[in-house]
Amino acid sequence: MIAVGINGYGTIGKRVADAVREQPDMRVRGVAKTSPNHEAELAVENGLPLYGAVEDRLDLFEEAGIELAGTVDVLVADSDVVVDATPSGIGAQNRELYEEHDTPALFQGGEDAEVADVSFNARSNYGEAVDADYVRVVSCNTTGLSRLVAPLRKEYGVEKVRATLVRRGGDPAQSGRGPINDILPDPVTLPSHHGPDVKTVFPDLDIDTLGLKVPATLMHMHSVNVTLSTGATAPEVRDLLAGEDRIHVIPEDTGIDGAGALKEYALDRGRPRGDLWENCLWGESVTTEDGPGGTDLYLFQAIHQESDVVPENVDAIRAVTGAADREESMATTDENMGMGL
């Protein structure tokens, strides 16, 4: 059994912990928190050993009546691999801790690519992370774009990707995020950072992205145009993408017209926290046009920012520990998480 430590038990960390507990070859060694909030209480209620992440705040847990199993140093030392799910920028500071204990670590997409040996997406470059010491699981948007690009490159070849990302202002619990009543170029300079981030997975990919931020919390929306190297019809592309376990092609007759309906659908289907681990791609949006530069593909997809990276973290754990190849790991992850809508 792979002993997994999780440093940070917030939006991503608690979801990764739940997913790890569903895997037959893994166990959660423990989770680390900086403060005794409701998520710390949840960890204890769920039977997870809780560790204090900041030395001079340990007394706060005692005052709150929350028992700690020790400090984060102990957790790191006793783990086969650590998933760092701390806020952006903190993971890079934590790398020294993981190096001290010679413990492999996974970082999240909010960190700079330089923090790790490889930026990771299971469908796209699993092999590059095998036996690596430090792996960065790319962000929710980069995960969504990478999952889409990988099968298209393999089947048709890709000349160019252009994507407009309409981004949620914040997660549902992030009351301090915005905008409140506005639509913002984010960033106003072009291209946005998402294209260069995708290139950390596909270094030779020609991709341009731009971003907008809107007053919503549910999901991100992508408008994507891909120039394919070889010809393809819309039905062929739909069938190809529908064959991907982590892409849900939404049938035309479902009545799902946006992110709100998708979240309701996930809740109705019993998904924990209403999570959507898959890219949610509208089948009727898939359109192709032949031109002098190749076949242009157009589509819309929605990305659930709180959860689509969760299965990628599980696969990255197997990669860095050499526990399975890509096909075996993804199949095991998907089956035990209940992938597929």
Image (tube, rainbow, N blue to C red):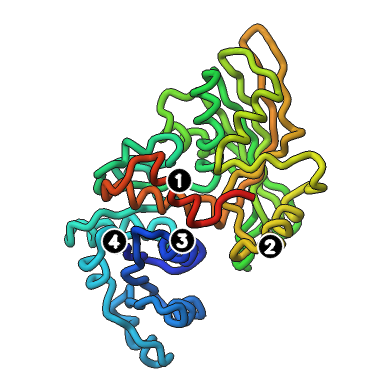
Q: Nearer the viewer, mark 3 or mark 4?
A: 4
SS category of the residue bearing label 4: loop
Q: Of label 2 and label 3, which has the lower sequence position?
A: 3
Along the line of sight, which residue is nearer the eye, 215 or 172? 172
Label 3 CA crowd tier, 10 Å (few <14, some 14–19, many 20+)? many
Along the line of sight, which residue is nearer the eye, 198 or 44? 44
Quickly name the residue at label 2.
267
Quickly name the residue at label 3.
19
Amino acid beneath label 1: Ala
Quickly name the residue at label 4.
1
Q: Of label 1 and label 2, which has the lower sequence position?
A: 2
Q: Please provide percent x and percent y for residue 165.
A: 63, 40
Amino acid beneath label 3: Ala
Quickly name the residue at label 1.
331
Label 1 CA crowd tier, 10 Å (few <14, some 14–19, many 20+)? some
Q: Residue at x 40, y 28 (%)?
A: 203
Q: Of label 4 and label 2, which has the lower sequence position?
A: 4
Q: CA distance from mark 3 to mark 1?
A: 14 Å
Q: Tell whether 317 sits left or right of 341.
A: left
Determine contact: label 3, label 1, CB under 8 Å.
no
Determine contact: label 1, label 2, CB under 8 Å.
no
Q: CA distance from mark 3 to mark 4?
A: 15 Å
